[in-house]
């Protein structure tokens, strides 16, 4: 019985969290920084060329996640999709 109650509680939290997630269309509409601009900002911040980009959501904010390649090294750069601020830049 305890397992059933625990699983029900976990499922309820998971479902309620999913209900608040933005759709891809809404997330893209909220991103005032374009993909092209996000790539330019990432490449300006960290030497390399963009090889991958993804738009995600963190705390109701669109975040561009740009993967850069410089020689044989990869870097991950996160760009705030609303402000253009570099949030994180790290070697992968």
Image: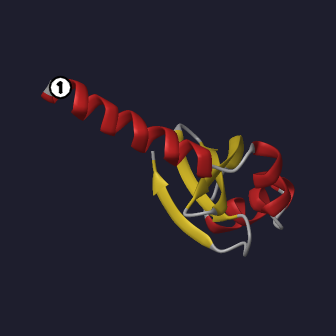
Colour mapping used in the image: secondary structure
Disc count in the image? 1
Quadrant location of residue 67? top right
Circle 1 sits in a helix, a strand or a loop, which is it?
helix
Neighbour tally class for label 1: few under 14, some 14-19, many 20 plus, Cα within 10 Å: few
Residue at horizontal 59 percent and vertical 59 percent from the top: 78
Closer to us: 14 or 51: 14
61 w.r.t. 48: above or below: below
Residue at horizontal 41 percent and vertical 44 percent from the top: 13
Residue at horizontal 53 percent and vertical 49 percent from the top: 75
9 w.r.t. 56: above or below: above
Quadrant location of residue 36? bottom right
Name the side, left or right, on which 21 lies relative to 38. left
Closer to us: 71 or 50: 50
Residue 26 percent across, percent down from the top left? 80, 52
Quarter of the picture holding the C terminus? top left
Closer to us: 85 or 47: 85
- Residue that label 1 marks: 3
* Extreme-front residue of the structure: 1
Quarter of the picture holding the N terminus? top left
56 w.r.t. 83: above or below: above
Residue 21 percent across, percent down from the top left? 62, 49
Residue 80 percent across, percent down from the top left? 66, 67
Quadrant location of residue 31? bottom right
Residue at horizontal 23 percent and vertical 25 percent from the top: 4
């Amino acid at each position: 019985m305890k397992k059933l109650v625990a699983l029900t509680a976990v499922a309820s939290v998971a479902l309620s969290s999913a209900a608040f997630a933005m759709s891809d269309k809404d997330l893209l509409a909220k991103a005032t920084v374009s993909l092209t601009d996000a790539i330019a900002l990432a490449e300006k911040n960290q030497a390399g060329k963009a090889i991958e980009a993804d738009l995600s959501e963190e705390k109701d904010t669109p975040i561009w996640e740009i993967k850069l390649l410089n020689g044989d090294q990869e870097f991950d750069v996160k760009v705030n999709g609303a402000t253009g601020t570099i949030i994180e830049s790290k070697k992968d």
